[in-house]
Amino acid sequence: MNSFKNRDGKRILMAMVKGIQQNKEYLGEVDGLIGDGDHGMNMNKGFTLFESRFADKDFSFTQGLDDLGTILFSEIGGSMGPIYGTVLCDAASAGEDAEDIDIHVLASMLRSGLLGLQEIVQAQVGDKTLVDTLSPAVDALEKGAAIEEDFACALREMKDAAAAGRDSTKDMAAKFGRSSRLGERSRGVLDAGAVSCCIILTAMADAILGMLA
């Protein structure tokens, strides 16, 4: 299979929820090194709110992304709520009319999410933000789509690209957010947003891989 039904996407959203819940303490530890230390708590709050409201309801992949994004945008503290809310809602909007989600649709959705983010935060690759994870992940999917690669192979390459992007932030100096005040002293630590983005993308990809098998 090289696609999954949009209507069957609930399991993907629930996998994303579990990914954040299982890593909330780690995200807090990473964020605490150069930030406020509340990233894990805030992300867990938003994803758990989504779970509590929608676990017993049916919804599509794009509906779930939009509902999760709306909660993150409006109901969690910190700067990351609006950032993730924008990414997820814009991604959902780009795929809402799709009956089937294939590599082309997912690549378009994630590209829309990235572009939406960069309209509100002028971060680029190299600025030590979640863009360092999301941008190479999108690039990997788009590269796979361009050569009509097997969806499963492209998802694995997306995961690898996201992880490499996450790890690259360790050697960067922060240019945005609270950690930017530290300047060169922010080097040597992963960016918390890049870490959470990798967790979300990995959970998403693994759930889709399970549906394609």
Image: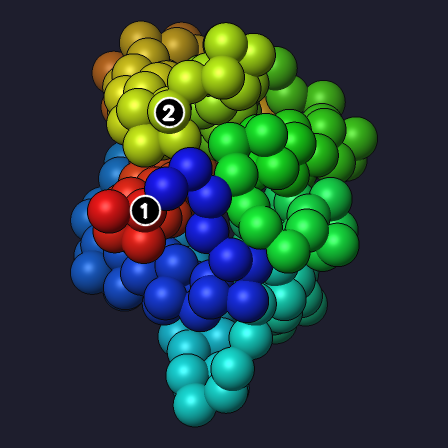
Q: As drawn, is 133 to the left or to the right of 167?
A: right
Which residue is found at the position 30% from the left and 24% from the top? 153
Check disc 2 and report its element: helix, strand or loop.
loop
The relative height of residue 72 versus residue 132 in the rendered view (above or below) is below
Question: Residue 57 at x, y = what percent?
Answer: 50, 87
Question: Residue 136 at x, y = what percent?
Answer: 46, 17
Which residue is found at the position 56% from the left and 59% from the top? 6
Category of crowding for the residue at label 1, using alpha-carbon neighbours closer than 10 angstroms: few (below 14), some (14–19), many (at least 20): few
Q: Quadrant of residue 176?
A: top right
Q: Which residue is mark 2?
A: 150
Q: Quadrant of residue 149?
A: top left
Q: As drawn, is 11 to the left or to the right of 72?
A: left
Which residue is more in the foreground, 141 or 54? 141
Check disc 1 and report its element: helix, strand or loop.
helix
Q: Which residue is mark 1?
A: 212
Question: Residue 147 at x, y = what percent?
Answer: 50, 9
Residue type at mark 2 is: Asp
Residue found at the very far bottom of the displayed protein: 56
Evaluate whether residue 16 shows in this view.
yes
Q: Earlier in the sequence, mark 1 or mark 2?
A: 2
Q: As drawn, is 90 to the left or to the right of 134?
A: right
Residue type at mark 1 is: Leu
Evaluate whether residue 179 shows in this view.
no
Estimate the spatial distance between the alpha carbons at disc 1 and disc 2, rounded to whole Å.
11 Å
The relative height of residue 64 versus residue 106 in the rendered view (above or below) is below
